[in-house]
Image (cartoon, rainbow, N blue to C red):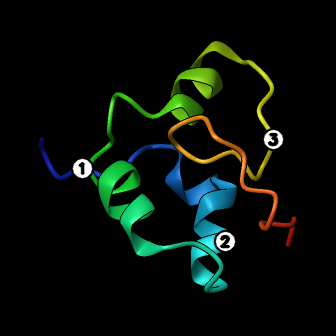
Amino acid sequence: MEKRECKWYPVCPLKRFYEAGKLNRRWIENYCMISNPDCVRRKMEERGEYHPDNMLPDGSVDESLSTL
């Protein structure tokens, strides 16, 4: 896959969780930094659908992540 940051990354809550040390870097590397087309968050954002801040790119919700 081409290395290209997702256009939503600068405003994505996952960026804040990662910068706060609450999210494993692998999520960022495997989804955000390569603009992974399999990212559920990205697909929902593009369709204008609600998704919680603590939803991971694979669509699972991580209850340990709280809003910052």
- Which residue is tagged 2? 17
- Which residue is tagged 1? 4
Q: Is residue 59 above or below residue 12?
A: above
Q: Amino acid at mark 2?
A: Phe
The kind of secondary structure element at disc 2 is: helix
Marks 3 and 1 sit apart, C-alpha to C-alpha, by 24 Å
Of tags 1 and 2, the one toward the viewer is 2
The kind of secondary structure element at disc 1 is: loop
**For the residue carrying disc 2, how many other residues have a C-alpha within 10 Å: few (<14), some (14-19), or many (20+)?**
some
State the residue at coordinates (63%, 13%).
47
Which is more N-terminal, label 3 or label 2? 2
The image's mark for residue 65 is: none
**For the residue carrying disc 3, how many other residues have a C-alpha within 10 Å: few (<14), some (14-19), or many (20+)?**
few
- Which residue is tagged 3? 52
State the residue at coordinates (31%, 54%).
30
Of tags 3 and 1, the one toward the viewer is 3
